[in-house]
Image (cartoon, rainbow, N blue to C red):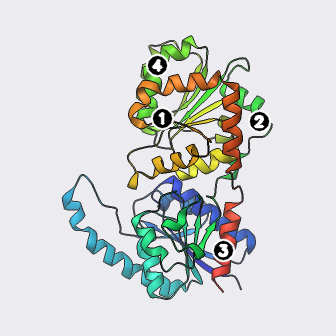
């Protein structure tokens, strides 16, 4: 008889992919495991989770809306409603354990689990824990973390350093450089910068490249550039009036493994899931943390790597002015590339999904 597990959270790809990876690992450990996801209505998980083959129930919950005071008035009612609905879900599904991966749905569901005496585990992705997770951590059986020094947020005896689950197919880059060069129609004789800003893109990274197109062309460098959905058309327009045959622009990278395999230097945001992938890939990285995230956790993630000499760091504020200069300097410094690549690889925890799944089974008793 398989265990019954609820996995809650989502909101962004950075929360959903790890959640699905944990579910897949639980199924690998025991195909009889029954898994139910709990997400937030209208968010990405309501589509992505069923596409991965799992059932999901949605809570009517949102975060604090910085731009609309009126929308925030409904928040306490939605929160209470979500806790009651979570208790009903727990009563009907009868889980052996619950897992929270972060995102709006995670809080009400884990709080309901604590009221219903269901053991739960928190997967804290970032180097700086958010307010909700800190509170929920007091009653959690286990907190799976990806960074050192997390005892400032959670009871030390319940912390397990597992790392963050990654999409394995994205980091499987060995022996794929030739295939990658063919895929992106790039030359093996010129250096390659990969620019990734997450699935929605990153305005700062895009502006940084657009501002210095001439510099990139003069340096004879090739670029694989993932602009994100919002910025793709504008970037395409800007490039069409500017002869840039060495720049490959994509809205979204379907083959992340090939993009990583082709790159000599990677420019990226500093989300926890992305960092977990970059550590396994083991290439020199320049991190430009997004300032528009809760509790500025991307900056803290990036600085955790910086303290290990495992990345270059450029602040969002200074990126448009200096990011491309930093990248071109790094491309010409083989010694520094080697040091950054070796140091980031030391931080890799490639079996996070399995390690977390084993902890989940362990807390079911």
Place of residue 192 in the rendered image (x, y in percent of width and height, measured from the top left): 64, 25
The residue beneath circle 3 is: 359
Q: Is 272 placed above or below 210 here?
A: below
Q: Please, what secondary structure does the residue beneath circle 3 have?
A: helix
Q: Position of residue 195 (x, y in %)?
A: 55, 32
Label whose residue precedes the other's in the sequence (4 or 2): 2
Residue at the spot of label 2: 176
Residue depth check, mark 2 versus mark 1: number of the one nearer the observer:
1
Residue 330, position as x, y percentages in the image: 61, 26
What is the distance, in whole Å, between disc 1 and disc 4 at their CAs? Answer: 16 Å
Q: CA distance from mark 4 to mark 2?
A: 29 Å
Give the alpha-carbon distance from disc 3 to disc 4, as whole Å. Answer: 48 Å
Secondary structure under tag 1 reads loop
Q: Earlier in the sequence, mark 3 or mark 1?
A: 1
Query: Viewed as shown, does residue 146 lie left or right of 190?
Result: left
Residue tagged by mark 1? 314
């Amino acid at each position: 008889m398989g265990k019954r597990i609820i996995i809650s959270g989502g909101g962004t790809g950075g929360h959903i992919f790890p959640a699905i990876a944990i579910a897949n690992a639980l199924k690998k450990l025991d195909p009889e495991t029954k898994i139910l996801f709990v997400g937030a209505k209208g968010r990405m998980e309501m589509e992505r989770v069923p596409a991965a083959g799992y059932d999901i129930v949605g809570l009517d919950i949102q975060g604090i809306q910085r731009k609309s005071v009126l929308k925030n008035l409904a928040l306490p009612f939605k929160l209470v409603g979500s806790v009651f609905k979570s208790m009903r879900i727990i009563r009907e599904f009868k889980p052996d354990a619950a897992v929270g991966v972060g995102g709006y749905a995670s809080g009400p569901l884990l709080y309901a689990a604590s009221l219903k005496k269901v053991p739960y585990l928190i997967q804290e992705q970032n180097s700086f824990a958010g307010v909700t997770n800190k509170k929920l951590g007091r009653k959690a059986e286990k907190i799976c973390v990806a960074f050192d020094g997390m005892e400032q947020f959670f009871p030390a005896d319940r912390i397990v350093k597992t790392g963050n689950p990654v999409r394995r197919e994205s980091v499987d880059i060995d022996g794929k450089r030739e295939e990658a060069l063919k895929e992106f129609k790039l030359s093996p004789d010129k250096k390659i910068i990969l620019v990734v800003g997450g699935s929605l893109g990153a305005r700062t990274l895009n502006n940084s490249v657009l501002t210095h197109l001439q510099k990139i062309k003069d340096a004879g460098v090739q670029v694989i550039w993932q602009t994100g959905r919002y910025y793709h058309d504008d970037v395409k327009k800007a490039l069409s009036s500017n002869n840039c045959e060495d720049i490959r622009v994509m809205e979204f990278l379907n083959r992340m493994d090939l993009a990583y395999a082709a790159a000599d230097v990677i420019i990226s945001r500093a989300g926890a899931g992305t960092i977990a992938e970059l550590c396994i890939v083991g290439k020199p990285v320049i991190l430009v943390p997004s300032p528009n995230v809760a509790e500025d956790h991307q900056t803290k993630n990036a600085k955790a790597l910086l303290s290990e000499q495992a990345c270059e760091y450029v602040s969002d504020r200074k990126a448009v002015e200096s990011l491309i200069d930093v990248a071109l300097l790094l491309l010409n410094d083989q010694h520094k590339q080697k040091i950054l690549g070796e140091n980031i690889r030391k931080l890799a925890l490639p079996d996070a999904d399995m390690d977390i799944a084993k902890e989940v089974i362990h807390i079911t008793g």
